[in-house]
Image (cartoon, rainbow, N blue to C red):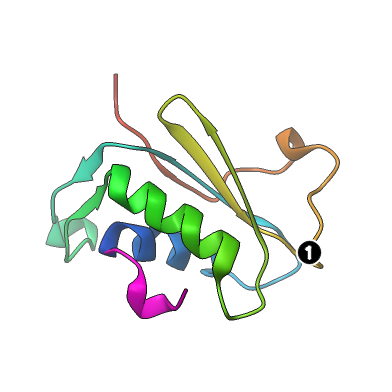
Amino acid sequence: MEWSDLTEGAKAVLEQTRNIKNDKIQIVEFDVGFVQEADPEEGLEDPISIQEDDYHSLKQYTQQNEYGEKYHMARNKNTVKIILLEKGKIPDNLSDIPVFREYKIEQ
């Protein structure tokens, strides 16, 4: 699966896993159903929407991407974590790694 095949919401999530390239693993956590309107004052030029089809697009991309990157995705109800793995390995204790970016529905 190629980048151009992804939904817009899936691209928004994956771009955050690459935002800071260093020795740190990047974790992005999102709720399926998250919507945020554009807010130029906050620096958000385009709205963000992460829906069920975006989740399925991400899942397919992380399993079949053609760029050699390895990801781990975990879903618990409607909350999903996606991690760009360094050296292709899942860390022993994910809870020790801070979440880089969250797209969470306020409750």
In the rendering, at what x and y percent does residue 33 appear?
Answer: 26, 36
Q: Residue at x 70, y 71 (%)?
A: 22
- Residue under the point 48% across and 59% down: 60
In this orientation, which residue lies closer to the viewer: 64 or 29? 64
Residue 99 drawn above or below residue 83: above
Q: Position of residue 48 (x, y in %)?
A: 23, 54
The image position of residue 58, as x and y in percent, is 44, 56
Q: In the displayed image of the protein, which residue is found farthest to the right?
A: 92
Of residues 77 and 106, the one nearer the viewer is 77
- Front residue of 64/25: it is 64
| In the foreground, 15 or 4 | 4
Give the class, few, some or many, for how many residues have Cα within 10 Å of label 1's Cα (few <14, many ≥20). Answer: few
Please state if 13 lies on the left or on the right of 76 as rendered. left
Instruction: Name the amino acid, label 1.
Output: Gly
Residue annotated with mark 1? 88
Q: Quadrant of residue 87?
A: bottom right
In the picture shown, does residue 47 fall above or below 6? above
Q: Is 105 covered by the magenta stretch?
A: no
How many marks are shown on the rendered structure?
Answer: 1
Left or right: where does residue 2 sit relative to residue 74? left
Residue at horizontal 30 percent and vertical 57 percent from the top: 9
Residue 16: percent from left, percent from top: 47, 62
Element marked by disc 1 = loop
Was residue 3 drawn as part of the magenta stretch in this picture?
yes
Residue 73 lies left or right of residue 87; in this view the side is: left
Is the C terminus in the top left, top right, bottom left or bottom right quadrant?
A: top left
- For the point 33% across and 52% down, which residue is it? 54
Which region shows up in magenta? 1-7
